[in-house]
């Protein structure tokens, strides 16, 4: 629910919100996250969840602007639509792995590159748009073809 809320609503409103490491902040506070979800479920009101998520977004933005949590400027530049033609080192590494092993899953790529699955997903969303890779077959049993 949280990922859907962030990705579909917030990223449509402001694209840069799709790149915030909110999942990392949530991961570090999983007990509170699940407590809030349980509370919302019990009272059939999502207000507490929205408040919790907005706090996490605010924290991520504050840390990003302070340069503590992640290099927002670098990430923003790597993933911006204006600079899609330039491939980041991570994207190049993904392409290299997929050229050798086109059946690799997102989880396997994340393990291989020692980065989060979410980061892999972001790159796999951009690479086909740059005509660097193409998905062949179904999502579960398909493979990637490096163009």
Image: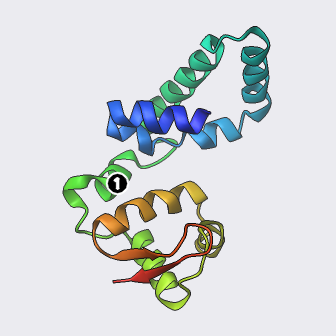
Q: 117 and 139: which one is in front?
A: 139
Q: Tell me residue 135's x, y (percent).
A: 44, 73
Q: Is residue 114 above or below residue 66?
A: below
Q: Residue at x 25, y 69 (%)?
A: 86
Q: Tell me residue 121's x, y (percent).
A: 50, 59
Q: Dot 1: few (<14), some (14–19), or many (≥20) neighbours within 10 Å?
A: few
Q: Residue at x 33, y 39 (%)?
A: 15
- Give the residue at mark 1: 74
Instruction: Work out whether residue 65 can be spotted.
Output: no
Most distant residue in the left direction = 82
Instruction: Work out whether residue 76 can be spotted.
Output: yes
Q: Residue at x 39, y 46 (%)?
A: 72
Q: 66 and 11: which one is in front?
A: 11
Q: Locate residue 45 relative to residue 82 in the image: left or right.
A: right
Q: Quadrant location of the C terminus?
A: bottom left
Q: Locate residue 61 relative to residue 79 in the image: left or right.
A: right
Q: Determine which quarter of the picture holds residue 101.
A: bottom right
Q: Tell me residue 28's x, y (percent).
A: 71, 38
Q: Residue at x 19, y 55 (%)?
A: 82
Q: Locate residue 86 relative to residue 26 in the image: left or right.
A: left
Q: Quadrant location of the N terminus?
A: top right
Q: 28 and 6: which one is in front?
A: 6
């Amino acid at each position: 629910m949280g990922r859907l809320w962030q990705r579909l609503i917030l990223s449509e409103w402001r694209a840069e919100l799709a790149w915030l490491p909110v999942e990392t902040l949530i991961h570090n506070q999983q007990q509170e996250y699940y407590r809030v979800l349980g509370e919302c479920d019990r009272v059939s009101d999502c207000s507490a969840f929205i408040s919790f998520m907005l706090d996490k977004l605010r924290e991520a933005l504050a840390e990003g602007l302070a340069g503590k949590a992640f290099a927002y400027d670098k990430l923003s530049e790597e993933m911006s639509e204006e600079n899609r033609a330039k491939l980041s080192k991570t994207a190049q590494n993904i392409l290299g792995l997929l050229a050798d092993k086109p059946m690799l899953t997102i989880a396997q790529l994340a393990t291989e590159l020692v980065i989060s699955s979410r980061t892999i997903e972001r790159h796999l969303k951009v690479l086909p748009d740059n005509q660097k890779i193409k998905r062949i077959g179904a999502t579960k049993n398909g493979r990637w073809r490096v163009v």
